[in-house]
Structures are given as structure tokens and as C-alpha cells.
Amino acid sequence: MRPMKPLGTVDTSFLLIENRTMPMHTGGLMLFSYPEGAHEDWLHQTFSANDDPDAVQSPFNQKLAWPLQRLGLPHWVTDHDLDTHYHVRHSALPKPGRYREMFSLVSRLHSTRLHRDRPLWEAHIIEGVEDNRFALYVKTHHSMIDGVGAMRMLRACLSSDPNERDMPAPWNMPRPRHEANGSPNARSVVNATAGALTGVFKFASAIRDRNEHGMMAPFQTPLTILNGRVTGSRRFVAQSWSLSRIKKVAKALNATVNDIVLAMSGGALRRYLIDQDALPAEPLTAMTPVSFRPADADVEGNSFSVLFATLATELGDPIQKSMGEGKRLFRSMNSADIPIFTSIIALPVVLPHLLKLSGRTRPTFNVTVSNVPGPREKLYWNGAPLEGMYPLSIVTQGQALNITATSVADSLDFGIVACRRSVPSAQRLIDHLDEALVELERCVSVA
């Protein structure tokens, strides 16, 4: 019998700050082409083979238990009454099944909270997508798994062999479990705390001189239209760019793909805010999650920390300095230090939500920009080619926009989630992202 697994501090915080206008789940929209020669009933039959509740694997078969009428810390327990027909749902787009209608449907699905008395996930199979395609939208609560863990989970259920069949759906994919090294003793806790505090002092030292290091701290950011109160209604838009094209720009600028993602996002936001007559004089600040999940770790839970990066006018030292300094900071800590460091650094982010102040005061940062590396090869599920994988993340009070990118083969897929009221015409950000990339290419003469 699988023992009860307690939630960590960061995992629990995602539960405590959640409310109707601020669902705390992430998601992914996977777009597939039908396999060659697939019959009319192929999609229904393939997913029907995955509806046995006893075949559902961890963490999809786990639900929350709150001791002492929710006065104690929550933990995960196995749900012995799991209903796969509740969790796995079917939808169909009206003809011609344009991407616009698909994004509209996913926007509505992403706006609703997950039921706390059931395992915290849903999967939606979407038929009738144009060009003979179908989609799978899966959302999971952030207390259950982070973006890197979700990417590994997805990769495990796909194959680079187009001829492989009888492959399970993500919720039925068995995963090896790794034994913990035992409970930490007092000395290890003290050492980890000391290492984390050293990291905090280095972080504070680095942000004292923004011109030298480019490091940003919470609240060093202007108030924009992106940083007010949000509703529960979401808008999702997505687009793909060639990863080779982006890598050419990165190489020419001695930068990383993540630097280019930040530069494209900064350029797009500048254009968008100019259109809205709302561009502040100060540069915007992005919160950028940084994963420290070991390769052999279990996928459940959260294993990430955060950095704050300036979104400069053009790619160059400001972005590269802020991210580079942050990466050096993490390299100076070990895996035991970083969770404690993250809990301390995250306090200015979490406390305003707990105190119901978010969106009413100066923001801790303006926007979240994430880049989750994905698989490098062409992938298939039961012979169906994966054509795109678009991430959907979280919008919170005070941060009405989230930009997340993930790579698959030679594609960098951007997913943008926004509060429908606070960020009008969010689809224009797609055009602005492309304009920002073209501007970078022009600067370095990359065709």
C-alpha cells in the first residue's frame, strides 16, 4: 500500500491562495494528426481502452486529505472510488474546426477550478480540429506537479517510433518510484537552512546594484494595466516558431534560448502596451521559474525556484546579466538549500495573495515568463504524430498575463494565458512576438 505523502510548503501554498477568480492549475494542449489509415472510430476506441479506473497511475489516482478539519497540513491518499468518466471528457468542434474555436474552448476549460474532493486533474479529448487533427487538453493542479514534471510525464507516454501501438494515456502510464533517503536529521536541516540563508544574502547583495548585476527584486517594478485585479475568465492563444531560427539568433548574440524567449516577450509587451497607450517609463519585470528537479526524481510535487529578470528594450546585457547572475547563485547552493531559499524568496509573492492585497498594491513583478525544455525528437502517440504542444499556466491577482514556451523537436511552442478583462485583445501578442523576433534577426543580420 502506498504511504501517505505530505505536501511541501510550496505545494500547500498553491492550495491556500486558490479561489474562484484564481484557479491554481496548469495545463497543456497537445495537437495530433490522425495516423495514416485511421478509421472513423479510431479516436473513441483508442481512448476507451484507457477508461479502467484501476489502471490509473500515481499521481492521477491521488486525492487530498486534510486532517483536523483542514487545520493540519494536507497529504495525498489513494482515491479508491476514482471515476475515469468524470476526469476524461470528450468535446467536438463545429465545422470547420478552426484553431480559433479550439483556443476558445480551451480558454473556457482552463477557467474552471478542479474539484477538491477528487484527484486534481482533468483530460479533454477534442475532435473535429481542421486539417484532420484532434487535440488533448490536460490540466493538473500546481500542488500536484510542476511544469518540468508534467513535461517528463508527457514524454514518457509518447514514442519516437510511429509504428508503436497499445500505448497508454498519460494518466495510465506506469512510472518508477524512487525511494527517499530517509527523514532529514537536525544537522542536515541546519546545514540546508544555513546554505539557503547564504543564498538569500547573495541575492540581496546582487540586487543592490542593478546596473552592475542586472538582478531584480520583488517590488522593483512599475504598475501597469497587467497588474490589477483579475476575473475568473481566461483567454488562451498560442503559436509556434522554429527552434532552429531562434537558436541562430541566440548564437549570434552569445545568448541562450531562454534569453531569446525573454527578449521576444519583452518586445511583444512593449508593442502591446504602446497599442493600449499604457507603456510605463520603467522596464517591466518578469518572474522566471527555474527548475532544480533531478533527472531521477519522482514527477509529483514542485521542484523549482524563481528569478526576477528585467525585460529590457532590446536583448543584451540587462537580460543576460540578470539571468546569468541568478544561475550563478543557484550553482552556489546544493539541492537541499534551494527549497528553503525558494520558500524565503517566495514570501513576497505568496503573502499578498494570502492577505488579499494582490492587485491592490504595487506588484511584486509584472508578468511570468517561463521556458520549459521539451523532447528533441519527433514524437507519436499510437501512431498519431504530435504537431504541437502548447503550455497553459496560471494567472493571479496582480499578474493578469502568463507567457510560457516549450520546445518539441524543432518547434518552440508559446502558450499565452490572460485575464479576458484585464488584457483585451490578447491575440495581438502573437503578432507582437513575431515582430520582436524579426527585430532581433534584423539586429544580428540573421535571415
Image: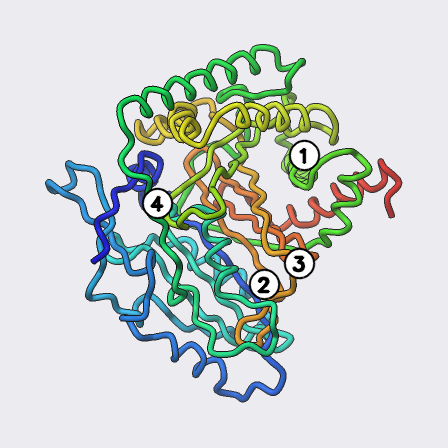
- Give the left or right position of residue 245, taking residue 79 as reference: right
- Mark 4 falls on what kind of element? loop
For the residues marked 4 and 2, what is the alpha-carbon distance in whole angstroms? 30 Å
Q: Which residue is mark 4?
A: 143
Q: Which residue is mark 3?
A: 409
Amino acid type assigned to the residue bearing label 1 in the image: Arg
Residue at x 57%, y 43% (from the top left corner): 403
For the residues marked 2 and 3, what is the alpha-carbon distance in whole angstroms? 24 Å
Q: Which residue is mark 2?
A: 100
Amino acid type assigned to the residue bearing label 3 in the image: Ala
Q: Residues within 10 Å of mark 3 (few under 14, many from 20)?
A: some
- Mark 2 falls on what kind of element? helix
Q: Position of residue 58 (x, y in %)?
A: 33, 58
Q: Position of residue 20 (x, y in %)?
A: 32, 46
Q: Is residue 56 above or below residue 393?
A: below
One can see residue 425 in this view: no
Amino acid type assigned to the residue bearing label 4 in the image: Ser
Q: Position of residue 193 (x, y in %)?
A: 36, 21
Q: Nearer the viewer, residue 94 or 305?
A: 305
